[in-house]
Image: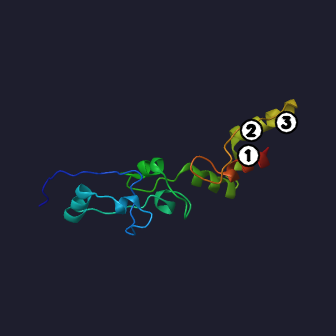
Amino acid sequence: MMSNSPTALIILDGWGHRTDPKDNAIAQAATPVWDELVSTRPNCLISGSGLDVGLPPGQMGNSEVGHMNLGAGRVIHQDFTRISKSIDDGEFFDNTAFSQVMAGTAQSGKALHLLGLLSPGGVHSHEEHIKAAVDMA
């Protein structure tokens, strides 16, 4: 029979885990409460990057991505991955809203102004996404 007992989900944004103390403030710090909890209580490490949180392989995550996935019971595919996939399979270029705006702009002879973030970072934007919008225009 299972017993009911208190459970705590402790999220330490930016804490990280690496045992090598070189260039590692957490491993070098005195953390007696943390050390006691880890040595006496059930615990585990979870991944917060790449495919585990709905990002491309090797792509670092962030707190927003981690929080979206915590407790979901499944991988939550991030906008970065969804937009990249839609570019790769051509669905991006069939977007009705984009197509209507671009066709209407071309028909009117007026300028189309695209505004977006240009960065290889992949957290809030990716340069390939704005490039696809320019290519579509």
Identify the residue at horizontal 29%, vertical 51% (top origin): 9
Cβ atoms at labels 2 and 3 below 8 Å apart: no
Q: Quadrant of residue 84?
A: bottom right
Cβ atoms at labels 1 and 2 below 8 Å apart: yes
Of the numbered discs 2 and 3, the one sitting upstream in the chain is: 3
Q: Is residue 89 visible?
A: no
Separation of residues labelled 3 and 1 (CA atoms): 15 Å
Instruction: Return the residue nearer the eye: 29 or 36.
Output: 29
Q: What residue would you read off at disc 3?
A: 106
Please name the amino acid that badge 2 sits on.
Leu
Separation of residues labelled 2 and 3 (CA atoms): 14 Å
Q: Position of residue 91 (x, y in %)?
A: 68, 51
Separation of residues labelled 1 and 2 (CA atoms): 8 Å
Answer few, some or many: residues within 10 Å of disc 3's Cα (few below 14, many 20 plus, some between 14 and 19). few
Question: For the residue labelled by badge 3, is the local secondary structure a helix, a strand or a loop?
Answer: helix
Answer few, some or many: residues within 10 Å of disc 2's Cα (few below 14, many 20 plus, some between 14 and 19). few
Give the number of the mark in front: 2 or 3: 2
Q: Is residue 106 visible?
A: yes
Identify the residue at horizontal 41%, vertical 48% (top origin): 67
Q: What residue would you read off at disc 2?
A: 114
Q: Position of residue 119 (x, y in %)?
A: 66, 50
Q: What residue would you read off at disc 1?
A: 133
Give the number of the mark in front: 1 or 2: 2
Q: Position of residue 102 (x, y in %)?
A: 78, 38
Q: Position of residue 46 (x, y in %)?
A: 38, 61
Identify the residue at horizontal 88%, vertical 32% (top origin): 109
Instruction: Return the residue nearer the eye: 55 or 61.
Output: 61
Identify the residue at horizontal 78%, vertical 49% (top origin): 135
Give the number of the mark in front: 3 or 1: 1
